[in-house]
Amino acid sequence: MDLGRHMPGDAGREEDVMKRTGWIALVLVVAIVVGFGANALAGDSGSNPASAPTPPRTITVTSTASVGTAPDEAVIEFGMRSEGADSGAAYDANGVKSDTVMAALVDAGLTKDDVETLSQDVDRQTKDRGTPNERTVYVASTQISVTVHDLKAVSSVIAAAVNAGADSVHGLRFQVGDQTSARQNALAAAVRGAERKADAIAAAAGTSVSGVVQVREENSNSKPYYYRGAALSAFGAAVAAPTIVAPQTISTQVTVTVIWAIV
C-alpha cells in the first residue's frame, strides 16, 4: 500500500476544513472593520467642537452691606474680691459680698436669669515679700456678667452694684439681643448691591443680566459697642449713678458672592 497517497474521503475532509477556516477568517475581518469604524465615529464626535456643550455666560460679583440696628441690651461685668487669713475665711467673706451685690442688682430691676457667674477663684498671695511684715493671705474673687434690658437703667445698675460691694466694673458693651432681623436686612442689602454691580458690568460688556445662578454667603458679623469711660474703673467708695449714653446703632455686616447669568 502507498502510504503517501490520500484516500478520497481524506480530500473531502480537507476541503471542509478549508471552507470553515475561510468563513472564520471572513467573520474576524468584518468584526475588525466594524470595530475600527465605530471607534472612528466616536473619535470624530468627541473632537467635533460643534457637538460640545456651550459653557454658560456668567458674571460673578461680591458685595458687602452693613445695616445699623438700635441696641436693646447692655452687658456689664462686675468683680468682687475679699481677703482672709485662710482660704475658707476668704471664700466665705467673698460669698457674703457677692450675695449683697446680687440682692442690690435685683432691687435695681434685674432677675437672677440676667446674671451669669464667669469665674470664682481662691488664691494664696504673699504680701510685703522680703520684709519683716511678710505674710501670707488668701484672696477670693468672683466675676459676674449682668445683662440689662432697659438701657436707661445701665447707670443706676452700675451704681447699685458698686455701692453694694462690687470692687471693679469692666467690659460694658451694648449689643442687639436678637440678630435675626438685622442679619436678614443686611443679606437683602448685600444681594441688591451685587445686582447693581452685575448690571453695571454687563452693560459695559454690551449684554444684560438674565437671572441668578448661585448665591453664597461669605461671612456675617455684628460688632458690639464697648464703652470706654471713667465709670469702668475700680471703685473704693459709694458713687452716684454715672452718666452713660448708649450708641444709636450697632452695625451688622454681611458679605455675599452672587453668580449671575447673562444673555
Image (cartoon, rainbow, N blue to C red):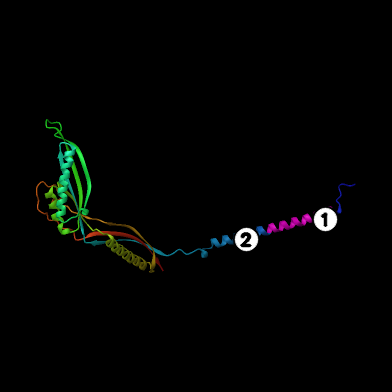
Other-residue count near label 1 (Cα within 10 Å), few / some / many at <14 / 14–19 / ≥20: few
Locate residue 42: give its quadrant. Answer: bottom right
Can you give x and y, in whole percent of width and height, for residue 118 in the image? 23, 47
Quadrant including the C terminus: bottom left
Q: Determine the residue positioned at 15% across, 42% down.
A: 93
Residue drawn at x 86%, y 52% is 7
Q: Is residue 19 magenta?
A: yes
Q: Are marks 1 and 2 in contact (CB under 8 Å)?
A: no
* Residue in the image at 20% along x and 47% along y: 143
Q: Secondary structure at mark 1?
A: helix
Q: Position of residue 78 (x, y in %)?
A: 18, 49
Position of 5 compared to 35: left or right? right
Kind of residue indicated by mark 2: Gly
Badge 1 amino acid: Gly
**Can you say whether 239 is above or below 254 in the image?**
above
Q: Nearer the viewer, residue 22 or 71?
A: 71
Q: Which region shows up in magenta?
A: 9-29
Whether the magenta-drawn stretch holds residue 213 is answered as no
Q: Nearer the viewer, mark 1 or mark 2?
A: 1
Q: Provide the residue designation for mark 2.
A: 37
| Residue at the spot of label 1 | 12
Magenta stretch, main secondary structure class: helix
